[in-house]
Image (tube, grey):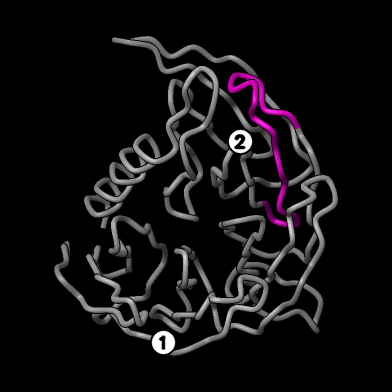
Amino acid sequence: MKKLLTIFITILIITSCEDGDISSSSFAGTGTGGSLASFMVTGKNLYVLAGSQLKTFNVEEGDGLEQKSTLYLPSWLETIFLYETRLFVGSNNAVHFLDIDDTDNPVYISSWQHVTSCDPVVARHGIAYSTIRVTDCRSGRPETRDQLDVINIKDIRNPTLLNSQQLDTPFGLAITANYLFVCEQGGISVFDNSDPENPVWRYNAKLGEGVAKDIIVRNGHLIVVTTEGIFNVSVDDDGMLTQRGRITD
């Protein structure tokens, strides 16, 4: 499995660089790294989560790697996602929204607080989607549950909850123009996202014998990492998934 994780990390770096590239004046698109990634490479910068710190490095030509800043946040930081000129950092008790207009110095904007859990996050067109997992993660209050939170981030300084949906042991997730894909129930749950504020569950697809952990969307395909291997899956216009290939250890 170590070999598979190495391949997946390489894919994260490549896709983050290609779709989240930063020029001197603007950001080009949205990052496409996996939602469980704990680091993000974009343009000349490497962002790394380390406990309650976000460390920013410049990745220079050749052997250069220069640390530029450290931002402390009041949580145990777990996942990082690039969205426009923002970093979304999932933690054990909140999603933190950071500004990176100055790419060397991320600045805290606001947070969306939730119960103690594991919470990858993705976003599109002013709406963020976060899976809240307490199963086999951390013990929360007795009434807590695994769920999908849909958060309005159009006013990034005042994020508001639009709705929550109950899930079953969710992990990573990914989004396209029309569909939201969530690793849960061991497979991939496909949600119709025609109404971004109210994703509608359609079906769950299994990939092999393993448990789906994270997803990257790339050119009409899903790259899915599971406990069994890495799967290349195509998505048609109706949201149907077809396995095209896989790598297993």
Along the viewing direction, whichever of 26 and 75 lies nearer the viewer: 26
Along the viewing direction, whichever of 249 and 128 lies nearer the viewer: 128
Q: Residue at x 32, y 68 (%)?
A: 227
Query: Where, by quadrant of the figure, is residue 18 drawn?
Result: top left
Kind of residue sitting beneath label 2? Thr
Pick the quarter of the image with the C terminus: bottom left
Residue corresponding to mark 2 = 85
Does the stretch in magenta take in 172? no
Q: Which mark's residue is nearer the viewer, 2 or 1? A: 2
Residue 153, horizontal then vertical, whole percent = 73, 54
Indicate left or right for 192 with 207 as reference.
right
Outermost residue toward the right in this view: 158
Q: Residue at x 67, y 67 (%)?
A: 138
Ranked by sequence position, the earlier of labels 2 and 1 is: 2
Q: Residue at x 60, y 56 (%)?
A: 125
Indicate left or right for 67 with 107 as reference.
left
Query: Where, by quadrant of the figure, is residue 246 drawn?
Result: bottom left
**Secondary-structure class at tag 2:** loop
**Secondary-structure class at tag 1:** strand
Residue 79, horizontal then vertical, whole percent = 56, 49
Along the viewing direction, whichever of 69 and 97 lies nearer the viewer: 97
Disc on res. 204? 1
Pick the quarter of the image with the N terminus: bottom left
Does the stretch in magenta take in 95? yes
Residue 10, horizontal then vertical, whole percent = 28, 42
Task: Check the image and report above or below for 54 versus 174.
Answer: above
Per the rendered image, the range of residues in magenta is: 91-107
Disc 1 crowd rating (10 Å Cα; few below 14, some 14-19, many 20+) is some
Query: Where, by quadrant of the figure, is residue 67 drawn?
Result: top right
Along the viewing direction, whichever of 246 and 210 lies nearer the viewer: 246
Label 2 and label 1: CA atoms lie apart by: 33 Å
